[in-house]
Image: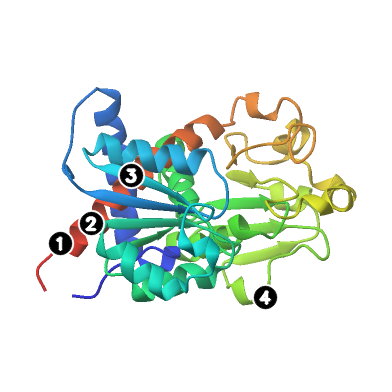
Amino acid sequence: MTLRHFLTLSDLSTAELNQIIDRAIQLKRMQHQNEVYQPFVGKVMGMIFEKSSTRTRVSFEAGMSQFGGSAIFLSSRDTQLGRGEPIEDSARVISSMLDIVMIRTFGHDIVERFAKYSTVPVINALTDDHHPCQLLADVQTFVEHRGSIKGKTVAWIGDGNNMCNSYIEAAKMWGFKLKVAAPVGYTPKAEFLNDCVELVDSAEAAAQNADLIVTDVWASMGQEEEQKIREKAFAAYQVNEKLMDIANPDCLFMHCLPAHRGEEISETMLDHKNAVAWDEAENRLHAQKALVEFLINENLKPA
């Protein structure tokens, strides 16, 4: 049996991704009804953080606890990873003591190398290139509010960053059209583009006929020193009520959070009648629980 990991969306088939979304909705219903479901008593997740987080840590840790298992928080300050131990060596040792590992780090090659030498499933909880767990939550949110995302038009407005890259991959996996509006110099790298993506030259062009508008902060973690430069470059790319008026009347708005009000979004955008960022944030818990359940069960299948 080949060990299954989740480093990018394409590590799973579209059918498997949809299975996880459906299961996430079911797990959410169970949790809201206070139904105790603990299939993983005694199972332990390792959570390796080289980038700080709120939603990622809380959602994975709470999810494992609700499943009856536990999670160990590991920062680079607390482990030999931060002192130069080869990733390959750390992967061999850490995975021998755990049932599943999630990693939130910088270079995507780090999660790839760790997964290569791990004996348990590895989840990419964010790298500089991809953020696939957030896409599971986003698609779950869209499905809950509007039904299937297949054939819909999604507008990504802002930086061509890791979230944008995962939206590009999601467009191919789920079959929706993606329009990306980013300033010159901040468009996604060519290596991430595919035939489901259209690069447009303004936020207004992206919003036209959109069923979903998504954005992210202008300066991601590690780019704080570029804040002032980016504020100038992205000034015309704010998502606000005027931009939503260009989109379809039932167009949803999402943001992976944390949001900088008055920058990439207007001060009141999170209160817009079609904004679903709070549902989107909660769904990190449910989508990741469905993902963890899928990966652990896949690994338990007989060879």
Foreground pick, 229 / 141: 229
Q: CA distance from mark 4 to mark 1?
A: 38 Å
Please report whichever mark, 3 or 4, sits nearer to the chain's N-terminal start.
3
Residue at image mark 2 = 296
Q: Residue at x 82, y 52 (%)?
A: 225
Q: Residue at x 30, y 60 (%)?
A: 16
Give the image location of residue 113, x and y in percent: 44, 75
Identified by mark 1, the residue type is Leu
Residue at image mark 4 = 190
Q: Mark 1 and mark 4 in contact (Cβ < 8 Å)?
A: no
Secondary structure under tag 4 reads helix
Residue 271 position by quadrant = top right
Residue at image mark 1 = 300
Disc 4 crowd, CA 10 A, few/some/many (<14, 14-19, 20+): few
The label number, if any, that marks residue 71 in the structure image: 3
| Residue 134 to residue 141: above or below | below
Disc 2 crowd, CA 10 A, few/some/many (<14, 14-19, 20+): some
From the image, which quarter does the N terminus lie in? Answer: bottom left
| Residue 94 to residue 51: above or below | below
Q: Mark 2 and mark 1 in contact (Cβ < 8 Å)?
A: yes
Q: Residue at x 80, y 59 (%)?
A: 201
Secondary structure under tag 2 reads helix
Q: Is residue 272 visible?
A: no
Identified by mark 4, the residue type is Ala
Foreground pick, 162 / 86: 86
Q: Mark 1 or mark 3, which is nearer to you?
A: 3
Q: Is residue 247 left or right of residue 295?
A: right
Q: Is residue 291 left or right of residue 271?
A: left
Q: CA distance from mark 2 to mark 3?
A: 14 Å
Q: CA distance from mark 1 to mark 3?
A: 19 Å
